[in-house]
Image (spheres, rainbow, N blue to C red):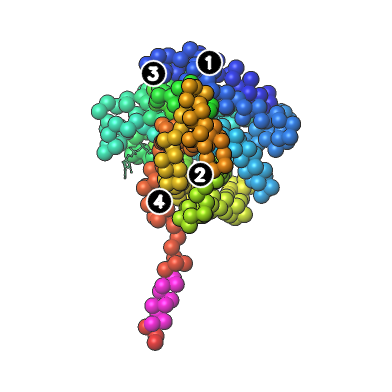
């Protein structure tokens, strides 16, 4: 097996998976009107792996089979490896204008670093260490697309998982057989689930020490019996790419995941009902150094896209001469360049970890991770402030060609630009600032990486402030001596 083409990827999605949308079971996600265009966008990412100009960058030879496999599965051992991975990830991020946060590279790097830390999983028993390595090799060599679900359902956040109204609301282990473990309950979100081959379950928020039954790390095929995915409303309402350039292409979908007595085969179990190991996983193995690298690269692509949309608005309505417009463009550019600086600094300061795998430096990646949730909503606000009432001058493709076409051509034109061009641009910008797909992007950036409040507070708690306070203490001591 080797890196897959788009066609092979789409074929893999036709597997009887249980996906629900609008109260109905989806027969085939690749043909469903509200999901098919998202699947096609992902298929195009897989096709990029076989673009003659990109093939070498997008793939590397599998150490097991020698076949070309996706580069984001590759453990980086040198800075050159990290740079190549960044360039590969940027190709995918650019292909979706940064609008699909969970392109497969996100979980490819996760599984890579899990497998590189076999020793961690083996603490629960050697078999679990072997399982994670074999699983990584399997998804790498079959080029499978993963989704993940980390958070228990948002029912009552004042209580831990085991003390919700019923014991099986949060996902937990309810039994064991010769074939594997039985799990029941739900996890609240899995982005990209209808478009994925596999579902990975692992921690984000810690459990109570006695909540072993809830402490599970495993991965199963999306089409596993008893596994249900419930989609939110789709933002792809079948409109033309002219009318909704983003919604018609970049619907990555978010789902609730319900486990109805699902059997997880033993070889797919990585942490088996072990709260101590579960809670230690994310703090100890440095996954975020690698996912943070992918996220920050996506942020560069997203910033570049938003800056580009802003600049086109500025040109199209002739506002570039106003000082406050220049100041706002300067602010956008500063966000872009700061995220780039975070990525470059993380690569330059990367350090080898266990097994010689290079870990991008976390401090710069924390900056990107903790500031982008604040910056992205501000970037969207700036687009609103620049476009102003122009967002309301956005007749549909049908209207542009309809009985009022001459009037529209006359009054909807821009500064030296025909009406159609101006309308097309503003409809694109409206998908970002006004439509549901744009609001979801803002929500995504605020929350996909966890609660931004707790993330920043943790930054404070974990940061070594000794060098900072030493300056103060030195000055105070000097004052004493004066
Ligand atoms: C668009 C989108 C896509 C996502 N995709 C995925 C995905 O693919 N996989 C996945 O696993 N997850 C995904 N998530 C979920 C994401 O991880 C969570 O949204 C995030 O961790 C916050 O959890 P929550 O939404 O349950 O909010 P909650 O934890 O319920 O928080 C709600 C509010 O209460 C506050 N609060 C709650 N508990 C505490 C506390 N203990 N201390 C202080 N304040 C508290 C929070 O600050 C917040 O203001 C996605 C989220 C979004 C919005």
Look at mark 1 in the image and give the residue it sits on.
31
Look at mark 3 in the image and give the residue it sits on.
22
Q: Nearer the viewer, mark 1 or mark 2?
A: 2
Seen at 67% across and 35% down, the residue is: 58
> Upstream in the sequence, badge 3 or badge 1?
3
Look at mark 4 in the image and give the residue it sits on.
456
The Cα atoms of the two marked residues, 1 and 4, are separated by 42 Å
> Residue at the bottom extreme?
482
Residue 97 visible to an observer of this rendering? yes
> Upstream in the sequence, badge 1 or badge 2?
1
> Residue at the left extreme?
165
What stretch of residues is rendered in magenta? 470-479
| Helix, strand or loop under label 3 | loop
The picture quadrant for ligand 1 comes to top left
The Cα atoms of the two marked residues, 3 and 1, are separated by 16 Å
The image shows residue 75, relative to residue 182, as above or below, that is below
Q: Mark 3: few, some, or many residues within 10 Å (few <14, many ≥20)?
A: few
Q: Where the N terminus falls, by quadrant? A: top right
The Cα atoms of the two marked residues, 3 and 4, are separated by 36 Å
Seen at 47% across and 67% down, the residue is: 467
Q: Where the C terminus falls, by quadrant? A: bottom left
Q: Nearer the viewer, residue 193 or 409?
A: 409
The Cα atoms of the two marked residues, 1 and 2, are separated by 40 Å
CB contact under 8 Å: marks 3 and 1: no
């Amino acid at each position: 097996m080797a890196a897959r083409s788009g066609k092979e990827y789409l074929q893999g999605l036709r597997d009887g998976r249980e996906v629900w949308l609008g109260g109905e079971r989806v027969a085939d996600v690749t043909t469903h009107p509200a999901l098919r265009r998202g699947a096609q966008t992902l298929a195009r990412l897989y096709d990029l792996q076989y673009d003659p100009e990109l093939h070498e960058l997008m793939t590397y030879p599998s150490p097991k089979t020698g076949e070309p496999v996706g580069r984001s599965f590759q453990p980086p051992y040198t800075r050159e490896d990290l740079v190549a991975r960044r360039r590969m990830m940027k190709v995918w991020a650019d292909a979706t204008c940064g609008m699909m946060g969970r392109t497969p590279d996100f979980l490819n790097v996760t599984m890579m670093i899990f497998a590189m830390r076999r020793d961690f999983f083996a603490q629960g028993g050697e078999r679990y260490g072997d399982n994670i390595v074999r699983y990584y090799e399997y998804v790498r060599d079959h080029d499978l697309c993963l989704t993940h679900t980390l958070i228990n359902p948002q029912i009552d956040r004042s209580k831990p998982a085991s003390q919700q109204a019923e014991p099986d609301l949060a996902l937990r282990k309810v039994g064991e057989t010769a074939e594997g473990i039985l799990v029941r309950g739900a996890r609240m979100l899995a982005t990209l689930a209808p478009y994925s081959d596999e579902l990975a379950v692992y921690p984000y928020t810690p459990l109570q020490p006695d909540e072993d039954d809830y402490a599970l790390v495993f991965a199963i095929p999306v089409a596993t019996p008893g596994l249900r995915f419930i989609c939110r409303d789709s933002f792809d309402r079948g409109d033309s790419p002219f009318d909704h350039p983003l919604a018609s292409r970049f619907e990555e979908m978010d789902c609730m995941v319900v486990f109805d007595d699902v059997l997880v085969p033993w070889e797919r179990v990585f942490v088996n009902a072990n709260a101590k190991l579960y809670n230690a996983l994310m703090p100890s193995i440095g996954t975020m150094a690698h996912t943070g690298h992918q996220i920050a690269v996506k942020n560069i692509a997203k910033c570049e896209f938003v800056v580009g949309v802003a600049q086109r608005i500025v040109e199209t309505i002739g506002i570039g001469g106003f000082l406050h417009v220049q100041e706002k463009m300067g602010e956008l550019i500063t966000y872009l360049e700061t995220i780039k600086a975070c990525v470059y600094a993380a690569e330059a300061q990367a350090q080898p970890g266990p097994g010689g795998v290079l870990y991008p430096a976390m401090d710069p990646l924390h900056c990107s991770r903790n500031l982008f949730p604040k910056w992205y909503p501000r970037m969207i606000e700036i687009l609103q402030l620049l476009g102003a009432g122009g967002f309301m001058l956005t007749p549909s493709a049908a209207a542009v060609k309809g009985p009022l076409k001459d009037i529209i051509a006359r009054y909807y034109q821009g500064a030296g630009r025909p009406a159609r061009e101006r309308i097309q641009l503003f409809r694109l910008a409206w998908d970002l600032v006004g439509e549901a797909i744009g609001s979801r992007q803002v929500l995504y950036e605020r929350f996909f990486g966890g609660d931004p409040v707790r993330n920043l507070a943790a930054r404070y708690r974990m940061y070594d402030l000794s060098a900072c306070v030493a300056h103060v203490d030195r000055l105070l001591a000097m004052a004493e001596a004066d």
